[in-house]
Amino acid sequence: MKIFAVKNIDLTPKTVFSNKMPVSFCAKEIPTQSQYNDLRVFYHHIYEYKKGLRSLVLTTEKADNRWIIENKLQKEQIPYVINNINAKNINVFFGNRDCIRVVSTFDSRLDKLTPEQDFMLGIMLGYDKILQCRRYFVMRDKYFLKNSKYS
């Protein structure tokens, strides 16, 4: 899994900036009103991240909007990882570089995370600590039962 980060942006002609917009932008690459509406939550998450309200964000978006999402995160110089869920949807993680490094070590399928990974992810995303502790024990018990040689 590749982490995309600010300092690693390849400055090929497709990402050379002119008038604060990538040179490769053309009319069809600017989000349509429909795409903008689909990405309103994504844009709001960027706002919250930049204001310091979140250190890590996870959002599920349409795969068709991947190019727009990647361009926006690169333009804003925000590290990110994108995982395919299926042909129609992607999971987009973005935020603090260290959080992204941790997330990139996890299985891209969130339903395959270990109880410990699930706990870490929940805490990094800012979920309630007490509820995450309870969730951890429930998941741990199910995980051990499922993976036990006696089950």
Image: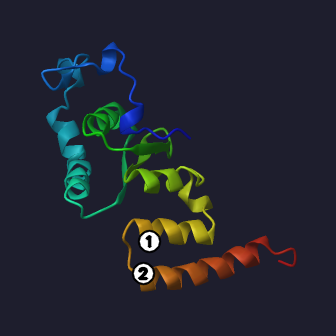
Q: Name the residue under label 1.
A: 123
Query: How far is mark 1 from mark 2, CA to CA?
Result: 6 Å
- Numbered marks: total: 2
Q: Is mark 1 on a helix, strand or loop?
A: helix
Q: Against 130, is 69 above or below?
A: above
Q: What residue type is labelled 1?
A: Ile
Which circle's residue, 1 or 2, is located before the other in the chain?
1
Counting other residues with Cα less than 10 Å from the Cα at mark 1, is it few (<14), some (14-19), or many (20 or more)?
some
Q: Position of residue 8 (x, y in %)?
A: 42, 32
Q: Name the residue under label 2.
A: 129
Spot the residue most to the front. 7
Depth check, front residue: 5 or 138: 5
Name the residue at 29% across, 62% down: 54
Callout 1–callout 2 Cβ contact below 8 Å: yes
Left or right of 125, for residue 105: right
Quarter holding residue 131:
bottom left
Quarter holding residue 76:
top left
Quarter holding residue 66:
top left
Name the residue at 50% across, 46% down: 85
Q: Which amino acid does label 2 sit on?
A: Lys
Q: Where is residue 93 in the image (x, y as percent from the top left)?
A: 41, 51
Q: Against 90, is 121 above or below?
A: below
| Quarter of the picture holding the N terminus | top right
Q: Which mark is residue 80?
A: none
Name the residue at 48% across, 38% down: 87
Name the residue at 20% across, 17% down: 26
